[in-house]
Amino acid sequence: MGDYPPRTVRLGPGAEFDWIRAAIASGGELPAAVRVGPGDDAAVIEGGWVLSTDLCVEDVHFRRSWLSDREIGYRAAVTALSDLAAMAATPLGLLASIAVPDSEGVDLDAVQAGVAEAGRAHGASILGGDLSRSPGPLVLDIVVLGRTSWPVLRNGAEAGDEIWVTGRLGASAAAVHAWRQGDEPSPEAREAFARPMPRISEACCLVEQEWVDALMDISDGLSGDVGHMAAASGVKVVLQAGWVPISDAALVALGAEGALEAALHGGEDYELLFVTDPGVVDVDLFAKRFGLDLTCVGHVLEGEGVWIDHGDGEPRPLERAGFDHFGSVDR
């Protein structure tokens, strides 16, 4: 880790992040062993240890009518593991704390089996956790532990960089839209929501190839997360609407306009968002290795905020951001 200094990463706008800013301000000075503190997808401790935690709350992040109990456990674990991907860290273990409602109907064994399945799939052993009864909803808190030789933060974007994403966006949001309408989503959309894929190997490849200057995962929507990256880096980003890669499931379910909205603002795609110097990414090499698209979706400029160009050459401020726990409706 060399002389990597302790730091916090500048946070973006939003009520959720106002709460986090207040918590950081009351937390005191970081110990010297903390190489990266609050503000990024995970904390980094001396020696390259990477730590993150993620809450998954019934009727906020999911509804039990949408998923099996095993899927609930699996999804909670992989969304936490995605924070390690966002730091280019390799998973080593996880701790799972579960609060089970007093009401009947939750199969705790199945929930725990889903967590364990996700851990095995991505090299994370279960190291411990806690169990409790809950007078309210089902709650899972997953702490993940990984390691990296050098973390990639979200604050490395500079004017002149390109903005890239892995995969295609909007399928998870299309599933949520279908459920809210009382319909059943397509198999592709349902799979995207129930069993997202943390892009751990893909993130490590980006770092190995030296293609990445700033990195994070897309959990709150492309618009929201690129806004966090812009705020952390002190830059302006311009997204090209026509370049955003949209999943077929979102296009079929929502139409072109609705699918673009889902890709920009829906969230929970858990693809990677990164910036890099122009001309360095080898799309064919990446596709051959992972069978996954890499797409440039915009550029970094001097200034601030998130802007979008719909093809008329006149970028406009992107008013709507992604998911905010204290500024958005529940899932």
Image (spheres, grey):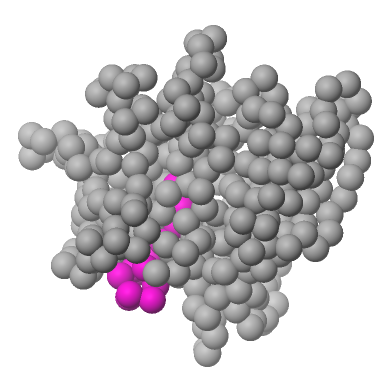
| Whether residue 124 is situated above or below residue 49 in the rendered picture | above
Q: Locate the N terminus and report the quarter of the image it occupies.
A: bottom right
Specify the quadrant of the image occupied by residue 288: bottom left
Residue 9 within the magenta-colored segment of the rendering: no
Q: Residue at x 79, y 28 (%)?
A: 137
Tell me residue 21's x, y (percent). 59, 52
Residue farthest to the bottom? 2
Give the residue at x 57% y 26%: 331
Which region is colored magenta? Answer: 206-218
Left or right: where does residue 148 sit relative to residue 166? right
Q: Nearer the viewer, residue 231 or 218?
A: 218
Q: Is residue 216 highlighted in magenta? A: yes
From what the image shows, is residue 218 above or below residue 178? below
Q: Is residue 244 visible?
A: yes
Quadrant position of residue 208: bottom left
Residue 185 % position (x, y): 48, 21
Identified at 27% across, 41% down, the residue is 245
Residue 27 visible: no
In this rendering, would 232 be left or right of 15? left
**Total numbered badges shown on the rendered structure:** 0
Tell me where residue 72 appears, x and y as whole percent: 68, 36
Residue shown at 29%/51% (left/top)?
293
What residue occupies the far top of the structure in this picture? 182
Q: Depth check: 184 or 266 in front?
A: 184
